[in-house]
Image (spheres, helix red, strand yellow):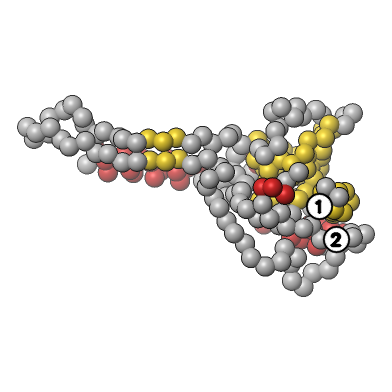
Amino acid sequence: MIIRVCLIFMALGLAGCASYPEKLQVTDPNVLVSYQDAASKADQVKGQSIRWGGAIVKVENKEKSTMLEMVYYPLTSYGRPLSSDESMGRFRIHVNGFMDPMVYQVGRLMTFTGELTGVEEGLVGEHKYVFPSANVTNYYLWKKLQRIDISRVDIWPYDYWFNHYPRPFSRRVIIRSSNDSGRHHSTGSSRPSGVSLPSGASTYPKPVSSANDIK
């Protein structure tokens, strides 16, 4: 009975967590522009709103603002980027003020709301690249997940239960880090079907195939 009650409370707690942090909530999620549309038809969606997330690749502080280069990942139901071995591409976010690279470290996961400004040409290594870009309105830096290995959980180890010592309930529980979980593999080209290259763009964003491509 006690276990059943605990499971009910755990389920309610998980259900309550399946929502975006307050600063990432928007009035109408249906009007948000997808990464695919921003990469393929930048002129048509310029000035519209986005809610994207990903992993930090580069932090470039300027005189009055900071540019964050991100590897794009889709978001979970509560807004955290779902990192995997592949990505649709990269994007750039511009934030007013200074952002310390020791806090916003390469590899950390972030989610943003913002306004699309178009595309920017740049380099990934020596490869010419076109980045969908946006000015940020709000952002959220996600905490690092720790791997916790619980080899044994004892329930009622010392109390009597119907005049008998209960047998300890043992179970191995592993909570994996963000690098271990959420693996998602996509297939096919990152270029959406039936769309044209953005005006002024020399190439579509190239998929990132592995963590080794982040440089």
Three-letter code, disc 2: Thr
Three-letter code, disc 1: Pro
Q: Position of residue 177 (x, y in %)?
A: 52, 40
Residue located 72% across and 49% down the image: 213
User: Which of the 4 image quadrants contains residue 86?
Assistant: bottom right
Q: Nearer the viewer, residue 4 or 153?
A: 153
Question: Looking at the rendering, in which quadrant would you find the C terminus?
Answer: top right
Marks 1 and 2, the one that precedes in the sequence: 1
Residue located 89% across and 59% down the image: 201
Residue located 79% across and 69% down the image: 195
Q: Which mark is residue 132?
A: 1
Q: Position of residue 66 (x, y in %)?
A: 82, 34
Q: Secondary structure at mark 1?
A: strand
Q: Residue furthest left?
A: 163
Residue located 89% across and 60% down the image: 202
Residue 197 lies left or right of residue 34; in this view the side is right
Classify 10 Å Cα crowding around label 2: few (below 14), some (14-19), many (20 and above): some
